[in-house]
Image: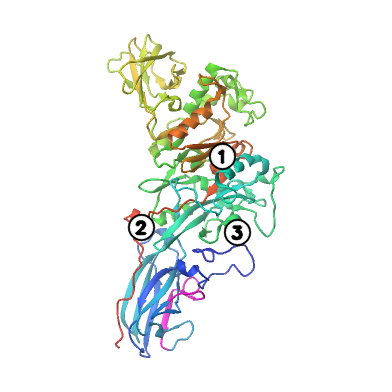
């Protein structure tokens, strides 16, 4: 780890500053050391053969991640020299007597020779207050104090300490307030001017860092969490392999494209920044911000990115990651012992990161999840109102003119990759082992219940699924829908709102075709019917409940050359959330009038659903050129320091060993 990893420091490759930090620096470094207290022994002098040994040892019952890590690599213990009354405490300049350079033990004898120390430190009355600095997050270490008289061991005392663990920040934590830089985004000139302007308006120029790190994906290069002890707390940056990418390096074999953008204001200085790794070392590491560099230079895999690692609020504390993430990173997180990992298979996407699929909301209750079926239903509504209306202007592949809703739904676009949007989204991505499997693993349900067939139905028809459009419902009352067959293939729909008795007619449909209810609050896709035909009078019912915590956000995908999913429409799940505020991509859907005037039906739907999720301020930004065209969005593009919670991990998680702040010396082995 880097010098002064607890309180701050510098790491800018300047000569003479790369060595280990084996001394207490000036204030406030001394305030950031854990106390290790040993009472003096009350004697005026020690026998010539007396010896006190302070040493560290590895516990036997520890996480496998720490198995190869020696005890002295985990902490530093500083020898106190400042007299305060009868006590000794640490001060600036005090040296480490145990640590990566000093070794695993320190001896105190009457006539010391380097590296021994004077046993007179323990003479008289008072306390010896050693300072302990944590180095390896989450590690355990046994500290042993022994008294010897020649070859005879008189006794020992032992205490187990734990270096405060690294904890991933959750969406419950607001972006840090104050005057320091707390939100980070790359300056890409005109390409992301709209995003930077919106962030500047929200946070002010004093809190927004518009960087020149030669990498647009701040979220992927590092993850920001925190570490906390009984005497202090700090932000901690977990550097990730993606941070290696720069103008001189390649990502998966391809030169990073940001370097050739016309007009991008990159001010490269060969002595300064050329990657997010260097950004974290030069601009983030400092007072109150530590940095973990263990994984910054390991081989880079597609899954080893911060967008593929997200903390989940609630109990038990968990974090989400996509399969394929480097096992070393996962072993480190597991060894912290605070948050449990939960993997999902994100291989259905070209950029298989969890933040492309799901986002846990700042209210701690709701969760956003991508939903191609809802998106398709919105397209059907738009086509019904105006099949010639254009959408996706300025977006790949129809960048110049976009395309009509009618073309997209019918599969008649001039672009081959858009000729089976329906099949790819509704059959392939919604196959049981794809998106539904991810939702099931995360316990994410639907606003729409599973359809029920009436017990006296006589036909062999089955309705396997139904859909609701919560974002178009007029209130938060649940609606029960009834589908009644008038013949073997035709049916009529009606709904009854919660708290009422009357059924309201809601349109007619036919097997083999998609159905949107007249109220535009429920839909049935042709693929959801199984069997041959119904008998007249057969009935199916289902309920759409707008009070559920699951928020189904409309997103459609196109297939890339490898058959993986790439966002066709804007991905509003991939957003920056901060308490009641969320910054997300602008929708570029069809503008139609369904009785509320001309509106982008995707933008309208998303805004209403985000408000249902607890967001009161919703900021839409144009992400097309800078991010959407490169398979990312606002969350991928940003990173933030978040407020450190007041709750303490050692009380919030009672199964974990609590930090020890107590005297370690109880045994008196020498006579007065």
Residue assigned mark 2: 650
Does residue 72 show up magenta in the picture?
A: no
**Dot 1, how many residues are within 10 Å of its Cα: few (below 14), some (14-19), or many (20+)?**
many
473 sits left or right of 295 in the view = left
Q: Looking at the rendering, which quadrant does residue 87 occupy?
A: bottom left
**Dot 2, how many residues are within 10 Å of its Cα: few (below 14), some (14-19), or many (20+)?**
some
Does residue 98 show up magenta in the picture?
A: yes
Give the residues in magenta: 89-110
Picture coordinates of residue 587, whole percent (x, y): 56, 31
Question: Sequence-wise, which precedes: disc 2 or disc 1?
Answer: 1
Q: Residue furthest right?
A: 262
Separation of marks 2 and 1 at Cα, in angstroms: 36 Å
226 over 626 or under it: above or below: below
Separation of marks 2 and 3 at Cα, in angstroms: 32 Å
Residue assigned mark 3: 282
Residue 6 visible within the image:
yes
Q: Residue furthest left?
A: 455
Question: Sequence-wise, which precedes: disc 1 or disc 3?
Answer: 3
Picture coordinates of residue 597, whole percent (x, y): 54, 21
577 sits left or right of 52 in the view = right
Helix, strand or loop under label 1: loop
Residue assigned mark 1: 633
397 over 36 or under it: above or below: above
């Amino acid at each position: 780890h880097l010098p002064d990893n607890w309180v701050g420091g510098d790491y800018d490759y300047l000569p003479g500053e790369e060595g280990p930090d084996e001394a207490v620096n000036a204030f406030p470094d001394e305030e950031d050391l854990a106390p290790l207290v040993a009472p003096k022994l009350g004697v005026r002098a020690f026998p010539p053969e007396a010896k006190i040994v302070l040493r560290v040892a590895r516990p036997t019952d520890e996480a496998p991640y720490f198995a190869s890590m020696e005890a002295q690599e985990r902490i530093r213990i500083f020898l106190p020299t400042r007299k305060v009354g009868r006590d000794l405490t640490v001060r600036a300049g005090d040296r480490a007597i145990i640590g990566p350079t000093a070794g695993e033990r320190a001896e105190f004898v009457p006539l010391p020779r380097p590296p021994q120390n004077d046993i007179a430190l323990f003479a008289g009355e008072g306390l010896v207050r050693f300072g302990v600095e944590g180095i390896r997050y989450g590690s355990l270490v046994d500290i042993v104090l022994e008294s010897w008289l020649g070859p005879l061991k008189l006794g020992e005392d032992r205490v187990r300490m734990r270096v405060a663990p690294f904890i991933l920040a959750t969406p419950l934590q607001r972006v840090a307030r104050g005057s320091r830089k707390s939100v980070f985004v790359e300056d890409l000139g005109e390409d992301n001017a709209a995003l930077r302007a919106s962030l500047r308006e929200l946070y002010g120029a004093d809190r927004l860092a518009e960087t020149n790190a030669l990498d647009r994906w701040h979220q992927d290069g590092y993850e920001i969490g925190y570490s906390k002890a009984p005497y202090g707390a700090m932000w901690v940056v977990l550097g990730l392999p993606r941070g290696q990418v720069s103008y001189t390096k390649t990502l998966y074999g391809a030169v990073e494209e940001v370097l050739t953008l016309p007009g991008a204001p990159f001010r490269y200085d060969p002595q300064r920044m050329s990657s997010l790794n260097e950004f974290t070392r030069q601009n983030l590491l400092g007072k109150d911000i530590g940095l973990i560099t263990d994984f910054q230079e390991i081989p880079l895999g597609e899954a080893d990115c911060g967008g593929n690692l997200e903390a989940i609020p609630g109990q038990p504390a968990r974090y989400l990651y996509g399969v394929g993430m480097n096992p070393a990173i996962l072993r480190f997180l597991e060894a912290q012992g605070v948050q449990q990992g939960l993997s999902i298979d994100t291989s259905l996407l070209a950029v298989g990161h969890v933040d492309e699929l799901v986002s846990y909301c700042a209210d701690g209750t709701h969760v956003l999840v991508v939903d191609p079926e809802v998106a398709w239903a919105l397209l059907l509504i738009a086509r019904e109102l105006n099949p010639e209306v254009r959408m996706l202007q300025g977006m790949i592949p129809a960048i110049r003119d976009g395309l009509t809703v009618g073309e997209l739904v019918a599969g008649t676009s001039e672009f081959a990759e858009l000729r089976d949007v329906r099949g790819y989204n509704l059959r392939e991505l919604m196959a049981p082992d794809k998106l539904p499997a991810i939702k099931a693993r995360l316990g994410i349900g639907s606003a729409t219940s599973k359809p029920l067939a009436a017990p006296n139905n006589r036909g062999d028809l089955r309705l396997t699924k139904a859909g609701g459009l919560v974002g178009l419902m007029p209130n938060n009352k649940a609606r029960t829908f009834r589908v009644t067959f008038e013949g073997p293939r035709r049916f009529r729909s009606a709904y009854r709102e919660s708290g009422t008795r009357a059924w309201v007619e809601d349109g007619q449909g036919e097997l083999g075709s998609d159905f949107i209810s007249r109220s535009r609050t429920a839909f049935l896709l042709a693929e959801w019917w199984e069997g041959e035909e119904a008998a007249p009078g057969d009935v199916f019912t289902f309920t759409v409940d707008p009070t559920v915590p699951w928020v189904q956000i409309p997103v459609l995908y196109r297939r890339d050359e490898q058959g993986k999913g790439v966002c066709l429409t804007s991905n509003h799940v991939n957003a920056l959330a901060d308490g009641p505020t969320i910054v997300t991509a602008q929708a570029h859907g069809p503008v139609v009038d369904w009785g509320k005037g001309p509106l982008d039906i995707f933008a309208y739907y998303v805004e209403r659903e985000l408000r249902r999720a607890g967001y009161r301020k919703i900021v839409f930004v144009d992400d097309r050129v800078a991010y959407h065209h490169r398979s990312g969005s606002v969350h991928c593009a940003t990173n933030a320091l978040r407020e450190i919670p007041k709750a303490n991990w050692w009380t919030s998680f009672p199964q974990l060993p609590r930090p020890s702040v107590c005297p370690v010396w109880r045994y008196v082995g020498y006579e007065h």
